[in-house]
Image (spheres, rainbow, N blue to C red):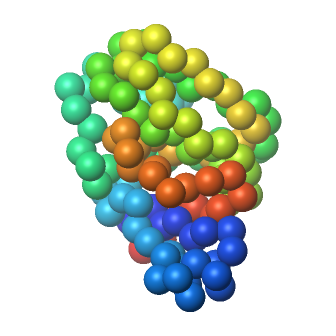
């Protein structure tokens, strides 16, 4: 499974050579309550090509923290596949929220070029 990013103005991006691109080729789904609660806590590193995808099913305010997360991470909040917020969070002390029905955590820099309004989706 891959995590794919498509800029909001896909036609303009395609013309500029910046069309759909893979953000991560190794995507893990945090489907269980325990997997969601643990997130990326206690990991010594987050591989460059890795993403942790949190599907929630309903859009509402979703918070992410980095307590016990040892490295900086990029977080992407999604509502119906559209990015609502992108934020780089510092290890151990950051908290951020946004409206979302899914959240993605990546290594810091993994969401470079992703902006609110863009599309991010899972693909085979």
Left/right of residue 8 with respect to residue 72 in the rendered view: right
- Measured as percent of width and height from the top left, residue 38 is found at 42, 24
Residue at the extreme front of the image, as rendered: 16
The residue located at (71%, 34%) in the rendering is: 98
Position of residue 31 in the picture relative to residue 96 (left or right): left
Please say if 105 is above or below 27: above
Q: Position of residue 8 (x, y in %)?
A: 68, 68
Above or below, 37 against 82 in this view is: above
Residue at 65% x, 62% y is 118
- Position of residue 117 in the picture relative to residue 95 (left or right): right
Which residue is located at x 48 percent, y 34 percent?
88
Image quadrant holding the C terminus, namely bottom left
Residue 94 in view in this figure: yes
Position in image of residue 67 (x %, y %): 43, 13
Q: Is residue 103 visible?
A: no
* Name of the residue lying farthest toward the left: 44
């Amino acid at each position: 499974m891959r995590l794919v990013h498509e800029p909001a103005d896909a036609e303009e991006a395609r013309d500029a050579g910046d069309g759909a691109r893979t953000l991560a080729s190794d995507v893990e789904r945090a489907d269980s309550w325990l997997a969601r609660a643990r997130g990326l806590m206690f990991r010594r590193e987050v591989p460059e090509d890795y993403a942790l995808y949190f599907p929630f099913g309903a859009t509402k305010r979703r918070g992410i923290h980095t307590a016990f997360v040892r490295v900086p991470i990029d977080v992407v909040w999604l509502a119906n596949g559209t990015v609502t917020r992108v934020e780089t969070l510092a290890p151990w002390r950051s908290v951020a929220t946004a409206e979302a029905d899914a959240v993605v955590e990546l290594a810091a820099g993994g969401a470079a070029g992703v902006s609110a309004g863009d599309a991010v989706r899972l693909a085979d």
